[in-house]
Amino acid sequence: MLNKWAEENFKADYEFLIGGSLMLEVNTKNSDIDAIYVVRKNTEYFWDEEREENNDGTKKLKSRATQFFGRLSSKCLDNKEKNCSDQSFYCYLCLQDKVSNLKRITEIRVPLLKFKFYGIDIDISYVQIPEEIKDNKNWMDEALNNAENNSLGRVFPLSGYKSNLIIKELLPKEEQKIKIFRSALILLKIWAENNSIYGNQFGFLSGTSMLIMLTKIYLLYPNTCSVLVIVDRFFLTFLTWLVWITLIFKAKLFIKSLI
């Protein structure tokens, strides 16, 4: 849908990235889809409803952020053709019969669009990077190292995507081992959900934290040959993890007291 909208309305140079559990192929039945829309900054202000004229005399939104989220006056309500007609991606989704529960969330560190497509939850984060960065093949690293972007939290979704790329490099390359890893992660996610301890917004485990924890287990035991074994070592390791940290901390305090 994003590609079709971009081709029909705006010729912006963009990247569309799929992250989250789908990127690592550990999505479950109730998993949502996390995507990132990366585009070059082309206006001074984020919200700029200025319009520019096309070759055929029609006018279109100039700011790429407004092209994506629509004008503030655009609302996905009744009489959609009238209330949402600015050719933005927001209005494009609004007019699709297969799209429901469309929400435009912009008053947060990373603005995004949330909606359901055929009943599947989809989150598309908007990331805007400086014009000069996109020409570099290592544009993602440059964007993450850019002080202005980091201070404003504009590239937060890219950090999660980059972390997944690094973890993928650490994961086993053998098909059988990667199947074991993915099955173990899905099993742990289902266990956490069934025990009501899943969801970082509530201070519990998230898919990312469990991924990092399980990757640590794989690095400790790279020759694990079954799902049950790696899950057993997962619980055993983290059950005793704090014990070892406490002992090391007390040992350091004891050594300092002797000096």
Image: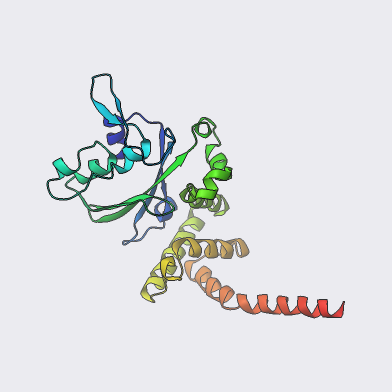
Image point (29%, 24%), residue name: 53
Is residue 162 visible to the viewer in this orientation of the structure?
A: no
Q: Judge left or right: residue 127 versus residue 29.
A: right
Q: Position of residue 165 (x, y in %)?
A: 52, 48
- Image quadrant for the N terminus? top left
How many numbered circles are shown?
A: 0
Toward the top, the furthest residue is 55
Residue in front for this viewpoint, 19 or 105? 105
Residue 91: x %, y % from top left? 23, 42
Q: Seen from this angle, which residue lies furthest left?
A: 79
Query: Which picture quadrant has residue 51?
Result: top left
Identify which residue is drawn at 38% across, 75% down. Answer: 196
Let me know if residue 236 appears in the view.
yes
Tell me: residue 217, above or below residue 157. Answer: below
Residue 199: x %, y % from top left:
41, 67
Q: Is residue 124 above or below residue 230?
A: above
Q: Position of residue 202 (x, y in %)?
A: 42, 70
User: How are the residues colored?
Assistant: rainbow
Q: Quadrant of the C terminus?
A: bottom right
Q: Residue at x 42, y 39 (%)?
A: 45
Q: Is residue 69 above or below residue 232?
A: above
Most foreground residue, 252 or 111? 111
Q: Is residue 88 left or right of residue 234?
A: left
Q: In this rendered view, identify the residue nearer to me: 73 or 4.
A: 73
To which quarter of the image does residue 29 belong? bottom left
Question: Quick check: 168 above or below 256?
Answer: above
